[in-house]
Amino acid sequence: MTQSLLWLRKEDKAGEHRVPLTPAGARELTDAGVHLVVESSDNRIFADAQYAEAGAELTALHWTQAPAHAVIIGLKELEDGTTPIAHRHIFFSHTFKGQSGAADVLARFAAGGGSILDLEFLADDQGRRI
């Protein structure tokens, strides 16, 4: 069986310093046996060293170079492009409410066989957005 691989991508959006996963959350995941890879970033609110201390593997590679079974987690939308996307992604995709450019993004996932788990639709047992 392949070990779970979660890949925290760096944010490309100018001025974005937030993250969907803190170092404390990273520690919980690595303690549970998840292989966590974190793209190095000078812009993230938390230092790379904090993720390394939490048991994550740091990398200079871009998420497009992640193994096929990696689940890519980010916060904001992906950079524009036409390259097909093959990975499973967890992020705010801005694609399911008719946003501008949504068809192009969804076409990239369809072409590559990837999938989106949109944080905007993450809800608790009572259906409340979390």
Image (cartoon, rainbow, N blue to C red):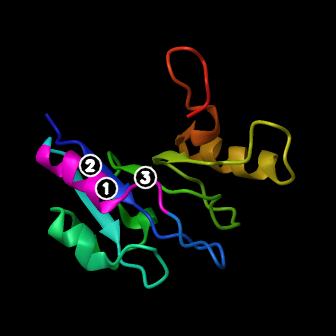
- Gap between marks 1 and 2 measured at Cα: 9 Å
Query: Disc 1 vs disc 2: which is toward the camera?
Result: 2
**What residue range appears in magenta?**
19-31
Give the crowd class for mark 3: few <14, some 14-19, many >=20 residues within 10 Å. Answer: many
Give the crowd class for mark 2: few <14, some 14-19, many >=20 residues within 10 Å. Answer: some
Name the residue carrying label 1: 67
x%, y% of residue 102? 79, 47
Name the residue carrying label 2: 5
Q: Do the residues labelled 1 and 2 touch (CB within 8 Å)?
A: yes
The residue under the point 75% across, 36% down is: 96
Q: Which of 48 and 128 is in front in this view?
A: 128
Circle 3 SS class: strand
Chief secondary structure of the magenta portion: helix
Q: Is residue 29 magenta?
A: yes
The residue under the point 65% across, 50% down is: 108
Which sits earlier in the primary sequence, circle 3 or circle 1?
Answer: 1
In the displayed structure, does residue 116 sit left or right of residue 32? right
Q: Which amino acid does label 3 sit on?
A: Ile
- Depicted 120 relative to depicted 94: above or below: above
Q: Which amino acid does label 1 sit on?
A: Pro
Query: Outermost residue toward the bottom?
Result: 42
Name the residue carrying label 3: 72
- Gap between marks 3 and 2 measured at Cα: 9 Å
Q: Which amino acid does label 2 sit on?
A: Leu
